[in-house]
């Protein structure tokens, strides 16, 4: 497998507002965990009239830290990358406090049923933006302009936001320096994800700021390793099919033999995302619904 050059170290303190560039500041919420890493990084864009990206969780200490960082400034836009509980819950309370609007793509296409393996921090099922953004739509403040890019894959409603004055992208959970992104059906879609990775790669941003963890430097090179890693995972699946395995559970036992078995259910959902993409691209045939119970095989050569 391609070795992704992960970066996991960065300088921060909970509640501290760090100046990252002339137009970017960040406050990290104290909600660390397996899906949030050190916590939610909330970005403040601009110097007078400002925008906030992914306000994060509703926590008293976090709210106090944001209030301190925003003292004397007017929030004009609150942007949300997607509907997970570590990103969007504080969006409406913060916007209401400042007389602003919440911007995002809207609710996910497929609401969670409650029975799926939990692969994320949880869904903010009631999230609905005040303003639904359009792909490539530009929003402006007193000294900044932000372009919204609809990037489905991690979720169907995921949006990245580009700060055009600095050729920088706030990429939510689409790309992270510390880990790969979770793609879990039915709302997550591997085909969409691979397409949007290539799109972001080709835009040649100077830097990416994920919502969790440190910045991604040399984004085009880094994203290409992300893509290579995913394509090699699909080749592993094809190898298992050639060996005669036909269901995802058996494939996971082989492909993830050196991984804690408690993580195999999550691995199975990742394999399912890849398998759906392989079926959609006519590389694999499915018997039955595209789910964990289906039997899969290679097409018979003509």
Image (cartoon, rainbow, N blue to C red):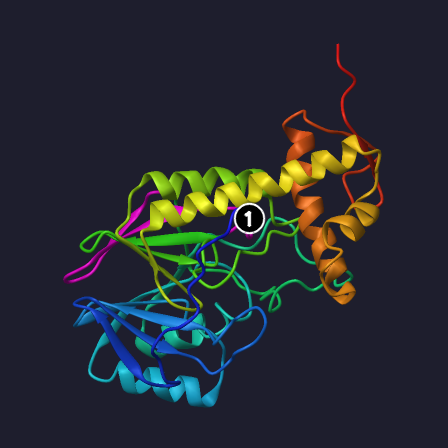
Is residue 7 toward the left or the right of residue 46 in the image?
right
Residue 242 visible, this orientation: yes
Where's the C terminus, which quadrant? top right
Residue 245 falls in image quadrant: top right
Residue drawn 61% across the image and 49% down it: 188
Image: 181 above or below 58: above
Q: How many marks?
A: 1
Query: In the image, is residue 219 part of the stretch drawn in magenta?
Result: no
What is the x, y in percent for residue 24? 24, 68
Residue drawn 43% across the image and 90% down it: 61
Query: In the image, is residue 146 part of the stretch drawn in magenta?
Result: yes
Q: What element does badge 1 sit on?
A: loop
Image: 164 above or below 75: above
What is the x, y in percent for residue 15? 37, 86
Q: Which residue occupies the foreground of this view, 79 or 216? A: 216
Residue 142 falls in image quadrant: bottom left
Residue drawn 69% across the image and 31% down it: 279
What is the x, y in percent for residue 152? 51, 46
Residue hosting label 1: 156
Residue projecting furthest to the top:
302
Is residue 211 toward the left or the right of residue 271 in the image?
left
Magenta stretch, residue numbers:
136-157
What is the x, y in percent for residue 190? 59, 42
């Amino acid at each position: 497998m391609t070795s992704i050059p992960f970066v996991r170290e960065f300088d921060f303190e909970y509640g501290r507002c760090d100046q990252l560039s002339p137009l970017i500041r960040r406050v990290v919420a104290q909600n660390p965990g397996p899906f949030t890493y050190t916590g939610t990084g909330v970005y403040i864009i601009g110097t007078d009239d400002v925008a906030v990206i992914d306000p994060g969780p509703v926590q008293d200490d976090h709210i106090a830290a944001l209030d301190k960082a925003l003292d004397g400034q007017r929030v004009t836009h609150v942007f949300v990358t997607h509907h997970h509980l570590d990103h969007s819950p504080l969006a409406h309370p913060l916007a209401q406090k400042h007389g602003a609007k919440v911007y995002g793509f809207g609710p996910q296409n497929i609401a969670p049923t409650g029975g799926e393996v939990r692969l994320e921090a949880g869904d903010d099922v009631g999230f609905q933006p005040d303003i639904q953004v359009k792909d490539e739509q530009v929003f402006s403040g007193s000294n900044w302009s932000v372009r919204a890019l609809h990037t489905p894959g991690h979720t169907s409603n995921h949006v990245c936001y580009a700060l055009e004055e600095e050729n920088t992208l706030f990429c939510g959970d689409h790309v992270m320096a510390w880990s790969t992104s979770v793609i879990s059906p039915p709302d997550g879609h591997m085909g969409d994800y691979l397409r949007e990775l290539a799109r972001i790669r080709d835009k040649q941003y100077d830097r990416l700021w994920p919502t969790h963890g440190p910045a991604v430097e040399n984004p085009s090179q880094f994203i290409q390793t992300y893509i290579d890693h995913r394509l090699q995972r699909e080749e592993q699946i094809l190898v298992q099919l050639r060996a005669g395995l036909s269901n995802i559970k058996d494939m996971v036992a082989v492909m993830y033999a050196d991984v804690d078995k408690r993580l195999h259910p999550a691995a199975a959902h990742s394999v399912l995302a890849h398998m759906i993409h392989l079926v959609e691209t006519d590389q694999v045939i499915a018997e039955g619904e595209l789910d964990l119970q289906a039997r899969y095989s290679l097409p018979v050569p003509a």
